[in-house]
Amino acid sequence: MARHTGARDVAIAGIGATPYYKRGETAGQSITRLAGEAILAACADAGLSATEIDGLAFYSLARAGYGDQMEAGELVETLGIRELTFTAALTGGGGGSAGAIGLARAAIVAGDASVVVTVMALQQRMRLGTVVASKAATPLGSFVQPAGLAGPGHLMSLLTRRHMHAYGTTRDAFAEVAISTRQNALNRPKARYREPLTREQYFGARVIADPLCLYDFCLESEGAVAIVTTSLERARDLRQPPVPVVAAAHGGTREWGRGFSWFGMPDDETFASSGHQAVAGWLYRRAGVTPRDIDVALIYDHFTPMVVMQLEDYGFCAKGDGGPFVLSGAIRYTPERKPGSIPVNPHGGQLSEAYVIGATHIAEGVEQLRGTAVNQVAGAELALVTGGPAALPTSGLILGRDR
Amino acid sequence: MSSTPGGGAKVAAALPAEAVKISVDPSTEPFWQAARERRLVAPRCADCGTFRLPPTPFCWRCQSAAVDWTELSGRASVYTYTVVDGYPGLPGITLVPVVVDLPDAPGARLVSNVVGVDPADVSIGTELTVDFHPISDGWLLPVFRVFRVAGQPAQERRA
Ligand SMILES: [Zn+2]
């Protein structure tokens, strides 16, 4: 029923990635080298020459991680792009990852570009857990930084505590997210972690920002992922089955605003949340579908509790029920989707496969709808891809199958 | 969690002065100038009375730029908190970063630290009172201590 709803005017035609490395392993390479390698792979996947690219749709202000920058001019220079007619980025940070495909769509639908690449390349030049502490003081940051909240996990521990207080969520729920995601990575050739994670390991791990422990944090990995978006019509003539964009949305509301850089969200509903409620609503309305129509969910997993909160905000369970929902086994991958369940991150996510600021989730959504995923959800027709819980924009994407 | 391996109770601290640098702009400077005089203030919209923190150029409710800087009692309560052992370059420090509600500035919250307390004695709802802690460049940072009525123990932990 949901097969023909939504936009479906553009499609993802190609995906590509570098290998996924551990922190420091790509230090000898440039960001342009990593990004270029992923772009060339995505073009090859699509059956296009990189010289045919005419648009770039970045997110995170085209930053590559936390200090580096991707430069359109450098990519044009080295990839031989003939004419670049669109180059833009969503504002914010990793919150915009899924939404960048919406930016690509905007360029294509407006007629400004026809082959649009979204790319993220990441090297870890500083420890992720210190990125907040190491920022130069700003007038607004001076209202958070002095408290010693050194990294993003420290900021999110404050939302997590409030969720536990308001809804009775326990660390068992976060353990289930970490353990089930690891389970999905075991057979993934490129996954950084392919050993099972036990409850004993989880509960024995160092607590970094109470209640969050080591295994609640995503990996510090390196690598790049690129996605090629074009019109659905053109994608049908290319090498891979097109994966249509059913809906894309980005943004947020005043009540979320800067989220866990602000902490002024007025009530538990918004404070103990992923900040995605508004985007979720826009996305389902634009797609003409409901959470029950989604077959597989690629949920941005920088921190386990934010997966729990996104499951609530995207309506897979009621607000506050995220803990019991995941503990029921509802997010475990099984080849056949069971009623009331939603397979989450069958690629092992950022917790166990690789952290490339949301881009691996888009690639996995594409593979699921091509029917070629390593952990394939049988007959998947609709995939939800989310951007990071972050200062707005947050973003989301629903991908479909052609015809 | 409340005890170090040696058996002594942990005490939550604030970062040492040299580890904390702030910057100010015309919207935020009155907050920090008041803190330097050991006064906690918050901007209240002069047109509609809405409090906001951090201080920003306009009132989100009515878009006015006019502000009354209102002196607060310094009382606060814990809205949420975390406990962090260690900070880059300071492996031995224990921090209890908090988000506090301010009863006399409804709708505005501050991110700060609870200091001088065993972290196990902090929970959501714990009543606090402001204190001021030296940071770089001669500024003072508002931090919070558990509120105690003279001659009485700290308020009972809430669930
Ligand atoms: Zn006002």
Image: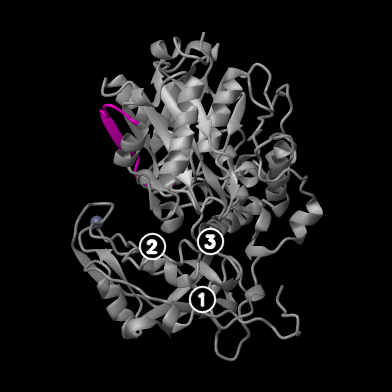
Residue type, numbered disc 1: Leu
User: In this rendering, would A53 be left or right of A374?
Assistant: left
Q: Residue at x 37, y 38 (%)?
A: A58
The label shown at residue B108 is: 2
Give the x, y percent position of residue A291: 57, 27
Number of marks drawn: 3
**Residue at mark 1: chain:** B
The segment highlighted magenta reads A80-93
Residue at which label 1 appears = B128
Q: Is residue A52 magenta?
A: no
Q: Name the image quarter holding residue B121.
A: bottom right
**Residue at mark 2: chain:** B
Q: Residue at x 23, y 52 (%)?
A: B62
Quadrant (top left/top right/bottom left/bottom right) for the N terminus of chain A? top right
In the rendered structure, which disc, 1 or 2, sits on the residue that comes first in sequence?
Answer: 2
Helix, strand or loop under label 1: strand
Give the x, y percent position of residue A98: 46, 34
Residue at which label 3 appears = A127
- Position above or below: A375 against A358: above
Residues marked 1 and 2 touching at CB (< 8 Å): no
Residue type, numbered disc 3: Arg
Give the x, y percent position of residue A136: 36, 67
The label shown at residue A69 is: none
Calculate the distance from the C-alpha at mark 1 to the C-alpha at mark 3: 33 Å
Residue type, numbered disc 2: Ala
